[in-house]
């Protein structure tokens, strides 16, 4: 498990509908491999407020009848296809890490931390 996830206080969860890109939000985006294999749906991101950086994509996958959550590092090379509502990543199912940790939601306090923290590198 990543060292950041072993310290969940440093991360906050932000719903996909609150993550903007030039063509809209992440809500409804499908995460696919570069060969168009569906990996799941993006439900949100994990943000580190102090550095103002998205650290992980949170991905929901249906396995049999169960809905499971996984994470993928946000620095994974990706291309957004806004017309198809797909985020194509240089990753496979094996690159997804099971995500059962509870993370607090991004709050107004986190926004203040982000505003007054040192500039992101």
Image (spheres, rainbow, N blue to C red):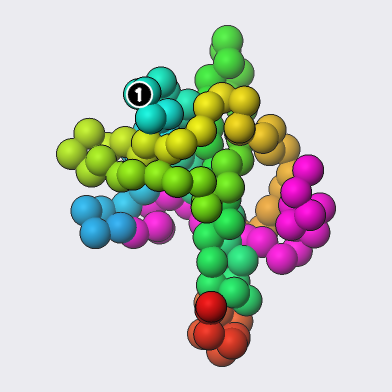
**Which residue is tagged 1?**
36
Q: Is residue 7 magenta?
A: yes
In the displayed structure, 2 sits above or below 83; it is below
The residue at 79%/54% (across/down) is 3
In the displayed structure, 118 sits above or below 39; it is below
Crowd tier of the residue under label 1, counting other residues whose Cα lies within 10 Å: few below 14, some 14–19, many 20 or above: few
Residue 109 visible, this orientation: no
Q: Position of residue 121 (x, y in %)?
A: 53, 78
| Quadrant in which the N terminus appears | top right
The residue at 58%/47% (across/down) is 73
Q: Position of residue 71 (x, y in %)?
A: 60, 40
Q: Nearer the viewer, residue 115 or 56?
A: 56
Q: Nearer the viewer, residue 75 or 28?
A: 75
In magenta, the rendered stretch is: 1-20
Q: Position of residue 49 (x, y in %)?
A: 59, 71
Q: Is residue 40 magenta?
A: no
62 sits to left or right of 78: right
In the displayed structure, 39 sits above or below 83; it is above
The residue at 66%/61% (across/down) is 11
7 sits to left or right of 65: right
The quarter holding residue 82 reads: top left
Q: Nearer the viewer, residue 92 or 62?
A: 92
In the displayed structure, 85 sits above or below 36; it is below
Residue sitting farthest toward the left? 83
The quarter holding residue 107 reads: bottom right
Q: Position of residue 54 (x, y in %)?
A: 53, 60
Residue sitting farthest toward the top? 64
The residue at 41%/21% (across/down) is 37
Residue 101 visible, this orientation: yes
60 sits to left or right of 27: right
- Tell me the SS state at disc 1: loop
């Amino acid at each position: 498990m990543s060292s950041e996830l072993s310290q969940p206080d440093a991360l906050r969860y932000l719903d996909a509908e609150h993550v903007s890109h030039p063509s809209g939000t992440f809500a409804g985006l499908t995460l696919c491999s570069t060969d168009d294999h569906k990996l799941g749906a993006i439900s949100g991101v994990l943000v580190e407020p102090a550095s103002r950086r998205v650290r992980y994509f949170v991905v929901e996958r249906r396995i049999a009848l169960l809905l499971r959550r996984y994470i993928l590092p946000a620095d994974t090379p990706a291309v957004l296809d806004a017309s198809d509502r797909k985020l194509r990543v240089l990753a496979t199912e094996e690159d997804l890490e099971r995500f059962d940790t509870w993370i607090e939601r991004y709050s107004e306090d986190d926004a203040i931390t982000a505003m007054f923290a040192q500039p992101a590198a």
